[in-house]
Image (spheres, rainbow, N blue to C red):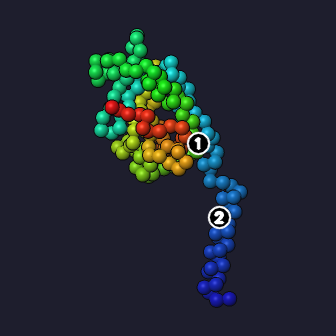
Amino acid sequence: MSRTNLVLLILLALQGGIVLLQLVGGRGDEAVQAGPFLDGLSVAAVQEMTLSDGDSAVTLRRTATGWGVVENDLYPASADKTGELLQELVAISTREMISRSSAHHVDLEVAEAAFNRRVRVEAGEQTHTIYVGKAGPGGSTYVRREGEDDVFSVSDFSPHKLSAR
């Protein structure tokens, strides 16, 4: 057996071992279960919500009579549209983990300085900030919680629903 054939045989055996480990042990991402993205958040608890597209932002605040636009002296916002948006935010459910690394945040448009949309929701003492990125395959959208590196794929939610205008 020539030296080249021996090297190729060793590489083939190593590659086979890696494939076997992946089949038996998995990558670790499979342990992430689909579920609520903003676990514990309820529509009734939300007092303020800020929507940003990077160029502009609008803040909606709950008032005694409904919702108001903070930038316009609490001019009334559409209660129906605000309620629908909050219902959809609370209902966001993860499909799968896309990345555990911040190295992919810019490409997926979920980085702090390069995002498609950012939503900050204040509910009591809690503040939830999520970055909504670009569209993924199959009608999915990429999302990430502020302060975390994990990026998830979610379905039935589009960044276009989060207009800051």
Q: Is residue 93 above or below residue 151?
A: above
- Res 81 → quadrant: top left
Q: Residue reaching furthest right?
A: 24
The local secondary structure at tag 1 comes to: strand
Q: Residue reaching furthest top?
A: 64
Rendered location of residue 65, percent (x, y): 40, 11
Q: Amino acid at mark 2?
A: Ile
Q: How crowded is the residue under tag 2: few (<14 C-alpha within 10 Å), some, or many (20+)? A: few
Residue pictured at 62% horizontal, 79% vertical: 8
Rendered location of residue 114, percent (x, y): 36, 45
Rendered location of residue 36, percent (x, y): 58, 33
Foreground: disc 1 or disc 2? 1
Q: Residue reaching furthest bottom?
A: 2
Residue 122 visible here: no
Choose the circle earlier in sequence order: 1 or 2.
2
66 sits to left or right of 35: left
For label 1, the residue is: 95
Residue pictured at 43% horizontal, 27% vertical: 121
95 sits to left or right of 77: right
The local secondary structure at tag 2 comes to: helix
Q: Quadrant of the C terminus?
A: top left
For label 2, the residue is: 18
Q: Amino acid at mark 1?
A: Arg
